[in-house]
Image (cartoon, grey):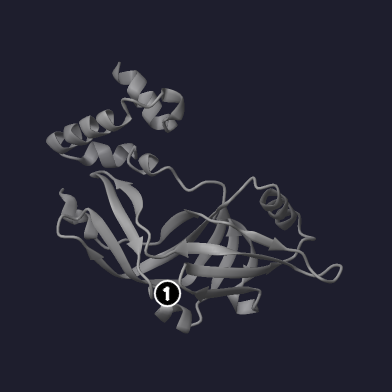
């Protein structure tokens, strides 16, 4: 395995972004409540992780142009699961790309218990991140495979989700143990040493649980 394997074709991906979500109450009693925010931002590099360590990833402007023109079926979910709260096909979920990224506006029914819980959490500022599920149809990697530019995506039958937290990038390294175990010994050792240097100064309480346990086991 080497860094060039990063460019291998992937399936459905989910990216998480800290965003400001706005809740607008209905103007008429019993009417829908509108939630607005960004499911993705463009031209900002985010740190991602895989078995080879950290790399930069950026969604480029125009990545959503083609898929939005094809009227994709997309639903609004909570943590990428449960019943749909809004749907592009029904007109209750509207998506558009602007200078910031992928903007979403959703009319949700506050009578539903799951929607009410989500709205309460948003109004209490207890959640403030969004994520979207998509497939990459065009991408470009830097020569050293340390930055991935996402040029075009497919949103059809994906979702935009209000999420508690974006998954800690380090957890995807342990680290899925299966990935780690499949690395050649020299690469696994190099990765382990690299992670050790990165997290050596971090208190165990601030580490992902899997890394904290691994660090304790190594002592």
Q: Residue furthest left?
A: 186
Q: Residue furthest right?
A: 29
Query: Which residue is found at the position 16% from the left and 38% from the top?
Result: 187
Q: Secondary structure at mark 1?
A: loop
Q: Residue furthest top?
A: 219
Query: Which residue is found at the position 23% from the left and 44% from the top?
Result: 52
Does residue 142 appear left or right of residue 54 in this picture? Answer: left
The front one of 70 and 18 is: 18
Please say if 75 is above or below 183. Answer: below
Can you give x and y, in whole percent of width and height, for residue 142 in the image?
A: 19, 60
Please say if 24 is above or below 118. Answer: below
Q: Residue furthest bottom?
A: 69
Query: Which residue is found at the position 52% from the left and 46% from the top?
Result: 165
The front one of 43 and 114 is: 43
Does residue 163 appear left or right of residue 210 in this picture? Answer: right
Does residue 213 appear left or right of residue 81 in this picture? Answer: left
Please say if 19 is above or below 198. Answer: below
Can you give x and y, in whole percent of width and height, for residue 218 in the image?
A: 29, 19
The residue carrying mark 1 is 64
Report how many numbered discs are placed on residues in the image: 1
Q: Residues within 10 Å of mark 1 (few under 14, many from 20)?
A: many
Can you give x and y, in whole percent of width and height, for residue 24 in the image?
A: 72, 64
Does residue 85 appear left or right of residue 175 in this picture? Answer: right
Where's the C terminus, which quadrant?
Answer: top left
Query: Which residue is found at the position 33% from the left and 23% from the top?
Result: 215
Please say if 56 is above or below 98. Answer: above
Q: In the figure, residue 181 lies in which quadrant? A: top left
Can you give x and y, in whole percent of width and height, for residue 57 in the image?
A: 32, 57
């Amino acid at each position: 395995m080497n860094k060039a394997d990063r460019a291998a074709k992937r399936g459905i991906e989910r990216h998480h972004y800290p965003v400001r979500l706005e809740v607008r109450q209905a103007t008429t009693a019993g009417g829908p409540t509108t939630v607005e925010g960004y499911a993705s931002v463009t031209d900002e590099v985010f740190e991602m992780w895989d078995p080879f360590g950290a790399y930069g990833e950026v969604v480029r402007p125009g990545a959503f142009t083609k898929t939005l023109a094809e009227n994709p079926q997309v639903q609004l979910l909570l943590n990428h699961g449960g019943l749909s709260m809004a749907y592009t096909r029904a007109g209750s979920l509207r998506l558009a790309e602007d200078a910031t990224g992928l903007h979403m506006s959703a009319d949700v029914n506050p009578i539903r218990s799951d929607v009410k819980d989500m709205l309460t959490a948003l109004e209490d500022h207890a959640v403030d991140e969004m994520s979207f599920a998509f497939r990459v149809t065009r991408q470009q990697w830097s020569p050293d495979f340390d930055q991935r530019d996402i040029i075009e995506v497919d949103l059809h039958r994906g979702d935009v989700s209000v999420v508690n937290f974006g998954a800690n990038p380090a957890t995807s390294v342990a680290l899925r143990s299966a990935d780690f175990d499949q690395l050649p010994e020299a690469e696994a050792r190099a990765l382990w040493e690299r992670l050790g240097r990165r997290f050596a100064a971090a208190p165990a309480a601030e580490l992902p649980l899997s890394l904290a346990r691994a660090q304790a086991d190594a002592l």
